[in-house]
Image: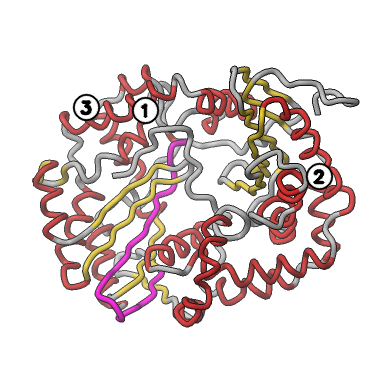
Amino acid sequence: MSLVLGRMSTFPSPTRGEGGLYRIVATLCFALFFLLLPALAAHAEMNIQEVKSKKGITAWLVEDHSIPLVAVRFVFDGGTAQDPAGKEGLVNLMSGLFDEGAGDLDSGAFQLKLDDAGAEMSFQAARDGIYGSMRMLSDQKDEAFGLLKLAVNSPRFDRAPIDRIRAQVLSGILANERDPDTIAQQRWLRAIYGGHPYARPDQGTKESLATITADDLKAFHKANFARGGLHVAVVGDIDAATLSGKLDEVFGDLPDKQMLAPVADIAPKLGQQLEVNYDLPQTSLQLAWPGVKRSDPDFYAAVLMNEILGGSTFTSRLYEEVREKRGLAYGVSSDLVDHEHSNALLVTTATRSDRAAETLSIVRQVVKEMAEKGPTAEELAATKKYMIGAYAINNLDSSSSIASTLVELQLDNLGIDYIKRRAALIDAVTLADVKAAARKLLSADPAVMVVGPPLVQVAGGGKG
């Protein structure tokens, strides 16, 4: 079970491993790099097979018979952006119910069977998809895949589990009603997305949750769970022929096509400053500039620029100016956020409230200098080296992370040979390319959100 109980989830981003999104984990793991190097090198050379079942279901498979485990990762297109108006939170609620009874097994019986099979199952609701995962012992894969088949095809949506999971979600919503950051984030989404589905809270509202029925869940499941919107990756102790049969067993009886509501593309509304006033000792700052689509030709130039600007934990320009030189914040970062229908470059930090205007002014100045001059050749060379070397740490360090990465590559239509081509794609980016990306993305007037006391004037300069 995996529920969004707090602020809107952005999991997972299609820029996974291509910028600063996993920089903290990468930094902490870097000390282990040389210990892990042989295994990571093997993963970098791993053989990715495309397996197609008799019923036409395609999966990417990495066989690894060194340990008796199998990891499965899949996603159905759609996600919380498909929540019907007035029933916001439906997809999130549904994601918590797949292991709460399926087929002829009620909640208790189903979870007991999972335990007996030594399997772990989870589902997560994201903006643009519903993700599912399963880890199993290979010698009990028949039992585990049988349970996954039931969960995917025949969830029960019984009254008692619905009420219990609904109560859990509602508890989180009520707690967040008193949380300044959550309140501010909801206002931020409405300000930059207006009436678009991306502005709605994934977990829904007190009012919308109360309207969701078992019939609503069944109808959405029928419309969303179809082979046409399915992407699958499998890693571990299973061969292609066996997997082909399991794909048909689990997914083969689903409808051919999804019935999704259209969702429009939207650019975040920039050039606005939203101040959410609370009497807090620390002020949170969030700024948004235009982003870049994963399919854009200048994607890698933008990723490299972002890493230099604020993606790297300890070496970025923002970290140097805000943290190292002035001690204004414990951390400051920039991230490229790329969803199916919108994208942005976000800068976030938090500082003492009496230094918030100063911090905001410095962030703007660092971004302005990057837009006007771009990075240096030395910065670009070091960032290329890091991004090429860190990919295995970020994305290929376990069977589950490999499966997750392969699903994201499918969603982005990057091709089964992408991991082999990736280093060359990064190396091909020139300094001129990165400078052009900086001008394109960072010359706009950003959207700004300030959460804390009213901004104090900066000496000699306004509010930043």
Q: Mark 2 or mark 3: which comes first in sequence?
A: 3
Residue 304 horizontal/vertical position (percent):
72, 60
Q: CA distance from mark 1 to mark 2?
A: 37 Å
Q: Quadrant of the N terminus?
A: top left
Q: Is residue 338 left or right of residue 151?
A: right
Of 242 and 461, the residue lying toward us: 461
Q: Nearer the viewer, mark 2 or mark 3?
A: 2
Label 3 Cα crowd, 10 Å radius (few <14 / some 14-19 / many 20+): some
- Mark 3 or mark 1, which is nearer to you? 1
Residue drawn at 75 percent across, 35 percent down: 359
Instruction: Please give the residue where the numbered disc 2 appears in the rendered image.
Output: 366
Residue 13 location (% of width, % of height): 53, 50
Q: Residue at x 61, y 72 (%)?
A: 389
Task: Report helix, strand or loop for mark 1.
Answer: helix
* The residue stretch that appears in magenta: 60-81
**Residue for badge 1:** 172
Is mark 3 in CB contact (under 8 Å) with mark 1? no
Q: Nearer the viewer, mark 1 or mark 2?
A: 2
Q: CA distance from mark 2 to mark 3?
A: 50 Å
Q: Earlier in the sequence, mark 1 or mark 2?
A: 1
The reply, left or right, for residue 185 in relation to residue 255 is right
Residue 82 marker: none
Callout 2 environment at 10 Å: few (<14), some (14 to 19), or many (20+)?
some
Amino acid carrying label 3: it is Asp
Say which of 178 and 218 sits in front: 178
What residue lies at 31% left-to-right and 81% top-to-bottom? Answer: 66
Residue at label 3? Answer: 163
From this view, report whether residue 61 is shown above or below residue 57. Answer: below
